[in-house]
Image (cartoon, rainbow, N blue to C red):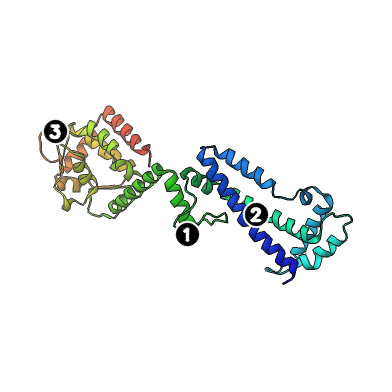
Amino acid sequence: MDDYIKLYLNTKSSEKAKAIEIIKGILIEYKSYNYSWNLVTDKITSKFSEFKSEILSNSSKFNNLNKVFDDAKRKYEPGFSLNAIKFELKDAFDLIPNSNITFKEYVVSLATNSAFSRIERLFSQGNDLYRNMYRTNKFDGYKNLPKFDIRKFELSGNDYHLSIEIEDLAWPEEKAKRELAQLKQIEFDKISLKKNTLFRFQESYISALYSNEIFDKISNRYFNEETLIKDYRNVFFEEIEFHKSQIYLSCNTNSFATFLNELKNHLAINVNYSAIARSKCFITSKTKIPLKRINISTSIKNGSVTDLKIAKDLVDDIKNFPII
């Protein structure tokens, strides 16, 4: 390998390592004062500018030389672009009058600028990850990042798991919400697979209907105090052969039948009135006997405007219930 190419590679490697250590040092120092993230990034930008060669950046003759290098690299196959240093860059450098530096010094400066620019760009691309890391005040010792590093992170595989690991430490309350949502989803998946149930609800409404808040609203309007939330969940979501729960109505049959009809029309895939009657799960408020099939049909027809408005309002509450 050409000596200048070797010099470029060795310099770039060592300068990348230096740049990473500078960033880590700033993160640790600024976290000890709890400085804002904006101050951190401003400090890194300022510090990096000290290591970049002003000669290469601000001199028109070196800017032109940098362009020669960038253009020449495109001529070569992948893995051989640095041949441009040997075959194009050296000759172009020799044509510059009064350069004030040697070609060796130029190569070192070129590699240094490239290293710091690359690390600065990667740090910017990984802003969210490093910001969460800063929030946790932990920069080493992650399962997928045992030692602090600045590199390109992918959105999949181990890098995805790393981002979640850091995010969970930075935002534990969000982790708790996500885990709760996952547990709920498992429960809802189980519900959706059950076949011999009185109600089959649309999947998008199961979360709301299963919640304590919606139970309270339904219960306050239609159930008496003997009906517990476990009874409600058993009757509305479980297969009937696996429970003995009953729901005791506090309202008249017309009112509850109107609500059942609104559930059937707007929230359910199926509501089987005959199965509801056979199950004997709903106990009427007046006669204290199980709700019958004929009662449901007749009561839907006899429901009042007020009954319908109350049922529709409750269905709207279920539709608009926030999903965690």
Crowd around label 1: few <14 · some 14–19 · many ≥20 (10 Å): some
For this rendering, which residue is in front, 144 or 16? 16
Instruction: Tell me: 236 left or right of 173.
Output: left
Residue under pointer 2: 118
Q: Amino acid at mark 2?
A: Arg
Query: x, y (%) of residue 19?
Result: 62, 52
Instruction: Tell me: 7 left or right of 287.
Output: right
Query: x, y (%) of residue 236?
Result: 23, 45
Q: Quadrant of the C terminus?
A: top left
**What's the mark number on residue 285?**
3
Mark 1 → mark 3, Cα distance in angstroms: 59 Å
Q: Single out the residue that lies furthest toward the bottom.
A: 1
Query: x, y (%) of residue 127?
Result: 56, 47
Q: How many numbered badges does the structure rendering display?
A: 3
Q: Residue at x 59, y 38 (%)?
A: 39
For this rendering, which residue is in front, 36 or 311? 36
Residue 285 visible, this angle: yes
Residue under pointer 1: 158
Mark 3 → mark 2, Cα distance in angstroms: 75 Å
Q: Quadrant of the N terminus?
A: bottom right
- SS under mark 2: helix
Q: Earlier in the sequence, mark 1 or mark 2?
A: 2
Instruction: Tell me whether circle 3 and circle 2 mark residues in contact (CB < 8 Å).
Output: no
Q: Amino acid at mark 3?
A: Ser
